[in-house]
Amino acid sequence: MTTNARVLERFPASHPRGSWPAEEYAAARRAEGQPVEVVMDLTTDAYLVVHPKPLRQS
């Protein structure tokens, strides 16, 4: 993960399906052409779907 990545969504690691909800969300964003990845934030115990660069504000 790059240091200036933007978090698009958070999913609790305690979810019964584990990282699947985060992976499904990321797959949908990738289908839209966004280069996202799923990372684990150990501090908050959550899966994060992140975009490698900050998105432009309109």
Image (spheres, helix red, strand yellow):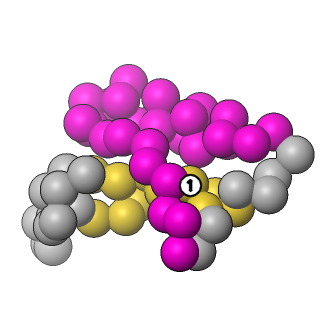
* Residue at image location 32% in from the left, 41% down from the top: 36
Compared across the picture, whether 16 is left or right of 12 comes to right
* Residue drawn 53% across the image and 75% down it: 43
How far across and how far down the image is residue 57, in percent? Answer: 15, 73
Residue at (49, 63) in percent of width and height = 41
* Residue stretch rendered in magenta on the structure: 17-43
Vertical placement of residue 43 versus 8, above or below: below
* Residue 6 in which image quadrant: bottom left
In this picture, is 47 found above or below 33?
Answer: below
Residue 28 magenta: yes
Q: Would residue 20 appear left or right of 36 to someone viewing this image? A: right
Can you give x and y, in whole percent of width and height, for residue 7 in the image?
A: 37, 64
Q: What is the secondary structure assignment of the residue under circle 1?
A: strand
Check the image and report above or below for 21 versus 5: above
Amino acid of disc 1: Tyr
Q: Is residue 43 visible?
A: yes
The residue sitting at the right extreme is: 16
Label 1: few (<14), some (14–19) or many (≥20) C-alpha neighbours in 10 Å: many
Image quarter in which the C terminus is found:
bottom left
